[in-house]
Image (cartoon, grey):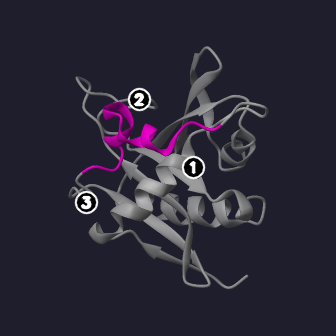
Amino acid sequence: MDLTIRKIESSDIGILKEMLYHAIFVPEGTPRPDKSIVDRPELKRYIIDWQHPEDIGFVAVADGQAIGAAWARRWSSDSPGYGFVDEHTPELSIAVLPDYRGQGVGTRLLSRLLQELKGLGAAAVSLSVDLRNPAVHLYERFGFTIVEARGTSCVMQCKL
């Protein structure tokens, strides 16, 4: 597969919306929610008004099609995201289209995003993930550790 990784631009809101939908973990045997779920305020906030000055992200493109994305935003303590740790730690979101999972796309996206965040002076990055999600193993390979458990989900953090 001929894969390129490029920065997310403000015009990529449609790509971000699609990737936000695919970032939602759905346990096996459970039907996927309707795509309109990403219009709910608690999810839409992960992509709305892209690109704030501190927003950073990358899109994976193969054969002219966006097949994955990884992005990070910071939240305030009065309006935290699902993977909030503190106001200085950006929260990561990542998705790869189902047909491209298990082919190293997520690894390349995550590697590029962590490299960029470190270069920008971030000390850590966090995320929220369902413990049943196979992506937990990817995060652990990159040094993410669980900092808080919340039912079947947890908040993980990686020191940069």
Q: Between tags 3 and 2, which lies in front? A: 3
Alpha carbon separation for disc pair 1 and 3: 20 Å
User: Which image quadrant: the N terminus?
Assistant: bottom right
Helix, strand or loop at label 3? It is: loop
- Picture coordinates of residue 32, whole percent (x, y): 63, 38
Across and down, in percent, residue 122 comes to 38, 50
Nearer to the camera, 134 or 119? 134
Inspect the image, locate mark 3, and give the three-letter code of the amino acid beneath it: Gln
Q: Name which residue lies at 46% across and 32% down.
A: 83
Q: Where does the magenta region start and end?
A: 32-48
Would you say 86 lies left or right of 152 here? left
The correct choice, above or below, for 47 with respect to 77 in the image is below
Is residue 152 left or right of 50 when viewed as pictured? right
Would residue 50 be seen by someone viewing this image from the given angle?
Answer: yes
Kindly identify the residue that appears in the image at 70 percent across and 44 percent down. Answer: 135
> Nearer the N terminus, badge 3 or badge 2?
3
Q: Mark 3 points at which residue?
A: 51
Residue 78, placed above or below residue 29? above
